[in-house]
Amino acid sequence: MKLQDQTDREIRFDIVVFNYEHIVSLTDYFDKIKNFRPDRDRLLVLDCSLNHTAEKQRVEEFARQRGWNFGREVQVIKRKNWGIDQGARVDYLSCLHETKQRPRYIWQFQEHYLDLRSPWSIWQEGSPMPAGEIKNDTIPDNLEIDLDECERIYENDAHVAVIYADRGKLGILSHQNGPESFYAGGANFSVRTADALSAFPPDILDSYRAIYDGTYEWALFMELDIGRRLTRADREWYDLVTHNKFSDAAALKRLEAEKHISLHQSAEAFYGPLYQRYEKRFNAVLAESAPRRRLHALLSLWYVDLLASGSRGRLKRVLNSLGLALLAKRMRHYVAVVLRQE
């Protein structure tokens, strides 16, 4: 995956949308994004849909209807389907490190973030939440994202690193060996590009790939860790709903007490143990050399693909038939002990 360099203009915002089969949730509700300026902004759809051609055609028609240049200010970039939206975030940030021209700011979200009506934005029967309830990883009611306003927020305060609009309010994660940190529902928020690149250098991104295991738990760890790495004393989070800002959980809670308002939600009880389990694996990989991290990343992706294809049993039988049972055993040990730190 690669981003196109557009050296003839400065890019203000990248609007980065992570899509899998639901691009209509973006195209039908894009009017909730105000003051998108095609001469200054860029809409990037990172798509891993099975029917990529049809999704791309919908975006092309969307751009044509608005008089926007498809392939320039509106782009669809095909990516491998790994790690759902969190894998797409890793891919985008990796490309951003490698590209010459970068936006000043980023708004990034799942394709259904703006859509409050579709089934994939609403809890269904049999789900862990009450049926009919709108999911927390969507935009709050009656809110529009004004890019001009967001630009002013960033320009008026150099300490603002993140702008968010969270239906379920900002999450706070407690950590056994460190301070509390913020996280946004679905990891949908805006970020100053310089802060994103500083928080997520290539070794961090490679480590995310290296511990990828194809599970929802990995994606949840990513949501929590992305927020944690952007929670710093010199980085403020700005709430687009209440227009409050804070750099840490203590400051947020003081503001709640002073104004008698609620600005946050506490993490689910299982979030902490889950985070710590993946953090252990993450730190082990991060401590390795860059070549070994990249090797881990390739092997993790290969192994998850192998499991998804149902070929693991066939591979084991082939190796056994060739007298390579020891190799198969060592492969299992590598996955369990090295990749997963079990």
Image (cartoon, rainbow, N blue to C red):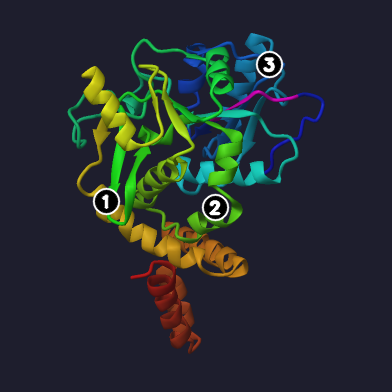
Q: CA distance from mark 1 to mark 3?
A: 42 Å
Residue that carries the numbered disc 2 in the rendered image: 205
Residue at 29%, 25% in the rendered image: 255
Q: How many marks?
A: 3
The span shown in magenta is 10-16
Residue 310 visible? The answer is no
What x and y, as percent, mark residue 313?
40, 71
Residue at 51%, 11% in the rendered image: 31
On residue 254, which mark appears?
A: none
Q: CA distance from mark 3 to mark 2?
A: 30 Å
Category of crowding for the residue at label 3, using alpha-carbon neighbours closer than 10 angstroms: few (below 14), some (14–19), many (at least 20): some
The type of residue carrying mark 3 is Pro
Say whether disc 1 or disc 3 marks the residue closer to the N-terminus.
3
Category of crowding for the residue at label 2, using alpha-carbon neighbours closer than 10 angstroms: few (below 14), some (14–19), many (at least 20): many
What x and y, as percent, mark residue 110?
45, 31
Q: CA distance from mark 1 to mark 2?
A: 22 Å
Residue that carries the numbered disc 3 in the rendered image: 38
User: Which label lies toward us, 3 or 2?
Assistant: 2
